[in-house]
Amino acid sequence: MAVTTVTIAKLANTTHATVSRALRDDPSISLKTRQQIKKLAEELGYRPNLLARGLVKGKTHTVGLLMSSYQIETGATKVVVLDKLATKEGYRIYVSYTKGELDRTVESANELIDRGVDGLLVYGSYLEESPKRLREKFSWDVPLVFFGMEQKFPCRQVVQDKSAGVMQAIEHLHRLGHKEIYMLFAYWANWDTDGRFEGFIKGMKKLGEDNPHKRMHIVTTEEAITDDGMVVYDQRDMLRNIREFLKTHPQCTAIVCGNDIVAMNVMHAAWEMGIKVPDELSVVGFDNIHTSQYTHPPLTTVAQPISKIVSAAWQMLLDDIENKNDKPAKVVIPSELVIRESTANVKIDMRIM
C-alpha cells in the first residue's frame, strides 16, 4: 500500500496539513517538527515525486476535481467544459468520483493533494455536516472551490440561482393564465437544499397560495446506478404515479418538473391518457438537456448555464492559485428560462368539462 501524507500524519500524531507544510519546509512549522516528519517520511518510503517536481517550478499545473456524479448529462458536460478551460491555461485535471459522500470526498482530496495538485474543485456534493466539522475537514492548504450545489458553511463557491429559475417558470405560466400549477419531481434526499424546492414555494406564495407544499408530488423512487454506470429511475413506477396524479388532479393545467426527465415522462403519460400538451396541459422542465429541444412538443425548461457556472468556478480557483486569496466568497449565476412549445395560454376548465 502506498504511503501518503495521511499515513505519516497518523503515525506522527499530527494533522495532514502540518505534514504537507513540513514536507514543503514551510517556516510556520518548527524546524524540529519538520525534521521529525521528514525523517519519518523517509523511513516509510514516502516518495512525493510529482510534488517534488512541482516545487521546483512553484506549482504542478494540475487541479483535482471531486465529482459526486458522472451519470447525468449536466454533470458530464461540466467536466468537458472544465477540461477545455484548464487545457487552455496549461493545466491538467485529475478527476475522482466521490458519490457525494463526505468521508470519500475528504479521502480523495487527500490523495489528490499528495499528487501535488495546485487546487481542488468539488462538484455537486451537498455536505450535511455541522459548519464547524466541515471547516475542520476542509482545512487543506490548497485553494478549494465548490460549485454546482450551494454549501451552508463558509467556503468559496459558485452556484446557480435555481430558486429564481423555478420562480421564472411559475411567472411565465401565470402570464399565460395558469393558476392550477403543480410541481412533480423524482425522489431525492436533498431536494430541500437544492433551490428548486424553495423556488416553487416562493413562487406559489407570491401568487397567493397559502400551502404550496400540497402542490408538490414525488413521482418515483430513489434513482439507481446500473452496471453500465447510468443513473436510472423506475420508469414504470414513474409513469404509473404520473398517470395517477393526472387522473386525480383534473384541475391541474400546468406542471413544473424537477428535471427534464420527469417532464418528458409527464408528456408521455399525458399522451397515453389523451391529454394534449400544451393545449390542455403546459409542462416545464429543468436542466435543458440536449434532447429537451427534440421532444414533441419541444420542452420549455429552466436551463443550467453550464458554461457560465464552470467558467466562474475555474476563474475563482485560478485566481486563488495565483493570488492566494483565501477569503470565503460566493458567486451566484442567474438561471435562464428557455421558452419552447410545451407551454401555452390556459384553456379554462378544458380537462374537467
Image (cartoon, grey):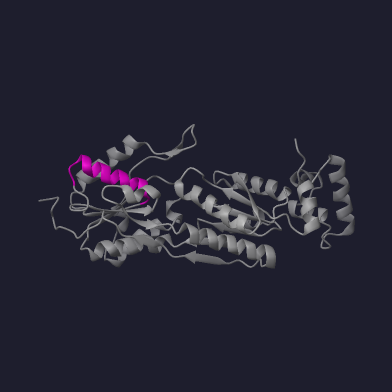
Q: How many marks?
A: 0
Can residue 59 be seen?
A: yes
Q: Is residue 340 magenta?
A: no
Residue at point 38%, 53% (across, down): 288
Residue at point 56%, 48% (across, down): 67
Can residue 324 be seen?
A: no
Q: x and y percent of residue 44 in the render?
A: 84, 40
Q: Tell me if 259 is positioned left or right of 122 in this view.
A: left
Helix, strand or loop for the magenta stretch, by majority: helix
Tell which residue pokes out farthest to the top in this image. Answer: 227
Q: x and y percent of residue 34 in the render?
A: 86, 54
Task: Give the camera-side residue of 301 and 136.
Answer: 301
Q: x and y percent of residue 160 in the render?
A: 46, 61
Vertical side of 10 occupied by 57: above or below: below
Tell which residue pokes out farthest to the left in this image. Answer: 353
Quadrant occupied by the N terminus:
top right
Q: Is residue 270 magenta?
A: yes
Vertical side of 207 occupied by 110: above or below: above
Q: Tell me if 201 is positioned left or right of 23 in this view.
A: left
Q: x and y percent of residue 296 in the render?
A: 26, 47
Tell me where the magenta segment starts and ends, as one range.
258-275
Task: Give the camera-side residue of 253 and 59.
Answer: 59
Q: Quadrant of residue 169?
A: bottom left
